[in-house]
Each structure stands twice: as C-alpha cells, then as structure tokens.
Amino acid sequence: MTMIIHEKFGDRELTIYLPEGYEESMDRYPVIYLQDNGDLVDPEDSDSLSLIRTLTANGELPAFLFVGIKPFDRNNEYTPFVSTNVFESGEKKFGGQAAQYAAYLAHELKPYIDSRYRTLRDGEHTGIMGFSFGGLISLYTALLYPDVFGKIGSFSGSFWFPGIVDWVDQLPACSHGQRLFMNVGHGEGAGRTNGQQWMVPNNLVVYEILLGKGFTAHTAKQIIFESDSHNFEKGVYYLPEALKWLYVTA
C-alpha cells in the first residue's frame, strides 16, 4: 500500500508518495518532482502509480519517492515570459514567473525534501516532470539547474509558448549528464489559430536544438504518438516507459 502524505511547506501544498517499504527500511530513494500537484501519478487521474509500483516489485524499476507540487497559479509560475494569455480574454497575461518558481524548486523545496526524507540527493537520482505547461516548466527548470535535476520528463510540453524556442537556442552548449524524455501527440494544436498551432513543430525543434547543446540520441528521447488533441491520458500513458528509459537504460 502506497503511503500518501499531504503536507505544507510554507504556503505551498505538497503531496508526497512514499515508496513501498519506506517505513520498514533505511534505504535512500531517488526523488521525482512533479508539477500540478503530482497529477502524473495521482490514482484519481490515471493508473500510472499502480503500474510503476508493479514494475518496481518486479525489479524493472527502482523505488521512487514522488513529490507533487501544487501551483499557486500555473499560468504565472509555469511560463518563462510575460505574454498574452491565449486562454482568457481581456488583459490577463501569462505572468512569466518561471525563473522564480524554478529557483524555489532548486534552492528551497529540494533542500527541504532532502532534510525531511531519506533521499538520494545527487542530480543523477533527482527528476522533474510534468504535462503540458508542467512539461514546459520541468524542462526549463532542469536546463537552468542541470546539476540539481538530472532526469527530465516533458509530456506534451507546451513549447508553443512564445519565446521558449529562442530561449533554448540561446543556451550555451554543455553536457551535464542529464537524460531527457519528451513526447507529444502528432496532431496536437491542429486546427488552432493561436500560438498552440506550433505545439508539434516547436516540440520537434526544441528536441533538435538540445541535440546540438550536449544531449545525444543516447541521453534524449522523443516519441510522437497518435493523438489529434492535447490529451492527458494519452501523454501520461508513457510515464512508466519514460521512467524505465531515464533510470534503467544505460
């Protein structure tokens, strides 16, 4: 039975998924930080956690400690730049507070989790993942703090967001030993007339840019799956496969 802990760190609500046997052992565990309050593994949203725990029990995956982080305002915290909000009319903007949020994850939340739980603290064992804007902010954060977050999962990442391709392109070339898994549905954004029409093309471009920045076909993997919409269920279906590739594949 997975132990799920709801706690607060300052004003931030967290959902902690402890691995099986955590209380009975003295082992330390890899940690994966999840956006959107951990929806990737929330049993109410998908059966991902059950599948992952089965793979762990079969020795196909290590045991993970998952940290779900509830956003205050995802349209502000998960966006790197101030921009017109395509979801709402009027003057409300995407807030562009991603840099502050990323710094919070690296400098405040991670040290707190490491002090409170038995974790493997190095970047090689520390992951960050999310879906949609959660995928965007996860890659953005990991690229800002490559020594902190060594495993990256972007599921249908919203790289249509204005300016993010140029931002990635302007990063210096380097190699930190990170591993990246990203996916997107082949028809996501089709028929849109706003920036979301760039969903698939920009995902492809970001992947290619990163291959020129130090990632290789052995450390970065991209999957284009069949989907004509932005679909959580279809994107997150690949989570167990992503974890295998990130943490097990040599």
Image (cartoon, grey):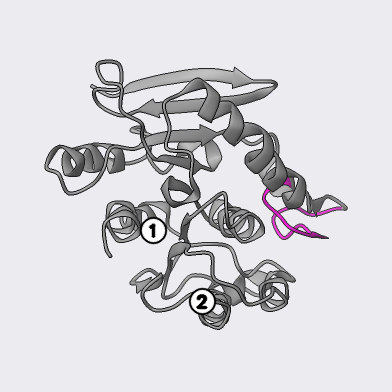
Q: Nearer the viewer, residue 89 or 151?
A: 151
Q: Is residue 235 above or below residue 103?
A: below
**Residue for point 75% across, 51% down:** 99
Q: Residue 168: percent from the left, percent from the top?
A: 66, 72
Rendered image quadrant of residue 117: top left
Dot 1 amino acid type: Gly
In the drawing, does residue 58 fall left or right of residue 114?
A: left
10 Å crowding of disc 1: few (<14), some (14-19), many (20+): many
Q: Residue 114: percent from the left, percent from the top?
A: 52, 29
Indicate which disc residue 217 carries: none
Q: Main secondary structure of the magenta part?
A: loop
Q: Which residue is mark 1?
A: 235
Q: Residue 88: percent from the left, percent from the top?
A: 74, 52
Instruction: Tell me the distance, in whole angstroms, between the alpha carbons under discs 1 and 2.
Output: 17 Å
In the drawing, does residue 86 fall left or right of residue 175?
A: right
In the drawing, does residue 183 fall left or right of residue 134?
A: left
**Quadrant location of the N terminus?**
top left
10 Å crowding of disc 2: few (<14), some (14-19), many (20+): many
Q: Which residue is mark 2?
A: 207
Rendered image quadrant of residue 171: bottom right
Q: Residue 66: percent from the left, percent from the top?
A: 42, 35
Q: Is residue 141 above or below residue 44?
A: below
**Residue for point 59% across, 24% down:** 13
In the drawing, does residue 104 fall left or right of residue 59?
A: right
Query: Could you tell me which secondary element the residue under label 2 belongs to?
Result: helix
The magenta stretch is 77-90
Q: Please identify, in this view, whether the residue under mark 1 or under mark 2 is nearer the observer.
A: 2
Q: Is residue 220 above or below residue 119?
A: below
Q: Earlier in the sequence, mark 1 or mark 2?
A: 2
Q: Magenta segment: does it hold 89?
A: yes
**Residue for point 60% across, 76% down:** 198
